[in-house]
Image (tube, coloured by chain):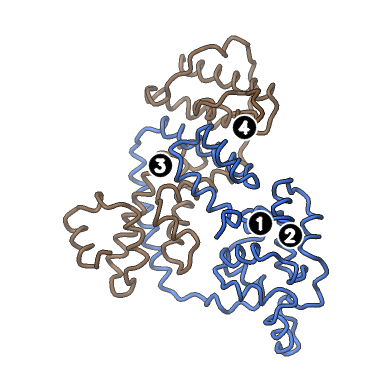
Chain colours: A brown, B blue
């Protein structure tokens, strides 16, 4: 455990980025907030920055209010875990900072997914299914922007079908213990296959435009 | 703590920590280890996959710096607010009050314990006989409320502290933790609950 002088030195010499966020989190909770208030403030602000940059990458800018409400709400829970004496999340942040942050982000996504479904039915043809799926990380900024808009625009269940396709899930499997998009989303084989086909078609269309 | 007594939060945290990606194998492995949390694990995997896709799509934007500045300033405000003293947690006189102080709802507690909200709500309102409530439930509830196990047990209907408070409370009813309002056993409450799946029911009736 570092003492306040060591933290001051780390901050003064710009070495904070080399310190693990788990360690910064523990310091925020254990340093004396009254005696070392300025230091705790700097460390909490630094941790909020680390969290904000991480979450910014994982939340669509096409969510309500540019996704910033979701990010600030998630970071608010992080502040609670620092400031509330016996907080149930504290142990988790000290072990896996980003994993815990993901779980709190998940809470927010779960909330917004329920209340924002704007369905737009799409004509599906059978041929879209066989086409190669594009690598999203390699998409141009313009393509990425259109795809992001598409993802936020469709029914959340279809968005989920698409992200599972990207994560390598089949639409359906015959294996009794099999994990597929149908089993993950609790829908029939036919529905899962239709959604996947529809989303593939939309993605390919938008990328071509 | 045995694995069966883990809360949803612990399971999802371990699921997230032990796997690099929300892969098919990860879901298969964890849903078979924790069948009563299977739905929640699948849901977490879907939302996790969404975050990963988003990482591939998101590109840096000038607006990011404004978000960072806001986040830093919000952290400082939170620290500032925390220097104002809050009412002490130990002041709660009933389970319902402890739930309010913990800033959670019965529905959130229920989700963490993989139980229907009706069961948790009946326990909190003192409708369930303390002697029938499983130790596992009491431990989980104590942890979620940030209380000692003894404190929680003492505030069940029929509990020692609840009986004492009811007598000493200037004739005022304290919460509803009085022994005469408890009508149900925990097991009846679980049996009667809607929206409980077979794995959850089996866990709470047979294992807990």
Judged from the image, the secondary structure of the residue bearing numbered disc 2 is: helix
**Discs 2/3, front:** 2
Determine crowd level at label 4: few under 14, some 14-19, many 20+ residues with C-alpha closer than 10 A: some
> B73 or A47, which is in the foreground?
A47
User: Which mark is drawn over residue B119?
Assistant: 2
Q: Find disc 1 in the rendering and name its residue.
A: B110
Mark 4–mark 2 CB contact (< 8 Å) = no
Seen in the picture, residue A100 relative to B24 is either above or below; the reply is below
> A162 or B156, which is in the foreground?
B156
Q: Find disc 4 in the rendering and name its residue.
A: A157
Judged from the image, the secondary structure of the residue bearing numbered disc 1 is: helix
Determine crowd level at label 1: few under 14, some 14-19, many 20+ residues with C-alpha closer than 10 A: some
Upstream in the sequence, badge 2 or badge 1?
1
C-alpha distance separating marks 4 and 2 = 30 Å
Same chain under badges 3 and 4? The reply is yes
The tally of labels here is: 4
Upstream in the sequence, badge 3 or badge 4?
3
C-alpha distance separating marks 4 and 1 = 25 Å
C-alpha distance separating marks 2 and 3 = 38 Å
Q: Find disc 3 in the rendering and name its residue.
A: A56
Mark 2–mark 1 CB contact (< 8 Å) = yes
**Discs 4/2, front:** 2
C-alpha distance separating marks 2 and 1 = 8 Å
Residue A42 placement (x, y as % from top left)? 29, 60
Drawn side of residue B87 relative to residue B112, left or right: left
């Amino acid at each position: 455990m570092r003492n306040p002088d060591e933290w001051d030195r780390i901050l003064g010499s710009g070495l904070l980025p080399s310190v693990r966020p788990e360690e910064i989190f523990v310091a925020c909770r254990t340093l004396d907030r009254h005696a070392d208030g300025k230091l705790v403030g700097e460390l909490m602000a630094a941790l909020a920055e680390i969290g904000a940059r991480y979450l910014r990458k994982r939340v669509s800018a096409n969510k309500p209010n540019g996704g910033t409400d979701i990010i600030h709400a998630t970071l608010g829970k992080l502040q609670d875990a620092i400031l509330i004496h016996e907080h149930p999340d504290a142990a988790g942040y000290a072990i896996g900072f980003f994993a815990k942050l993901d779980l709190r982000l998940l809470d927010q996504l779960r909330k917004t997914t329920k209340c924002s479904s704007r369905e737009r039915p799409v004509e599906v043809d059978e041929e879209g299914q066989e086409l190669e799926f594009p690598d999203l990380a390699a998409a141009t900024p313009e393509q990425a922007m259109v795809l992001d808009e598409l993802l936020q625009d469709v029914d959340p269940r279809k968005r989920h079908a698409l992200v599972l396709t990207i994560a390598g899930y089949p639409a359906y499997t015959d294996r009794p213990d099999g994990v597929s998009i149908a089993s993950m989303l609790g829908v029939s084989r036919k529905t899962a296959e239709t959604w996947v086909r529809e989303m593939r078609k939309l993605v390919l269309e938008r990328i071509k435009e | 703590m045995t694995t069966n007594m883990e809360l949803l939060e612990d399971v999802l945290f371990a699921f997230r920590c032990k796997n690099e990606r929300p892969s098919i194998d990860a879901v298969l492995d964890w849903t078979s280890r924790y069948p009563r949390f299977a739905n929640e694990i699948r849901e977490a995997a879907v939302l996790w996959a969404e975050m990963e896709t988003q990482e591939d799509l998101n590109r840096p934007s000038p607006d990011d710096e404004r978000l960072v500045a806001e986040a830093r300033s919000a952290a400082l405000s939170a620290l500032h607010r925390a220097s104002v003293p809050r009412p002490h947690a130990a002041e709660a006189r009933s389970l319902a009050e402890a739930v309010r102080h913990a800033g959670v709802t019965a529905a959130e507690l229920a989700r963490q314990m993989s139980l229907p909200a009706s069961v948790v709500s009946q326990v909190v309102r003192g409708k369930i006989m303390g002697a029938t409530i499983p130790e596992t439930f009491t431990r989980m509830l104590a942890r979620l409320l940030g209380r000692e196990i003894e404190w929680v047990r003492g505030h069940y209907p029929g509990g020692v502290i609840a009986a004492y408070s009811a007598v000493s409370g200037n004739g005022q009813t304290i919460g509803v933790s009085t022994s005469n309002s408890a009508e149900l056993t925990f097991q009846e409450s679980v049996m009667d609950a809607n929206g409980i799946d077979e794995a959850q029911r089996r866990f709470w009736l047979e294992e807990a």
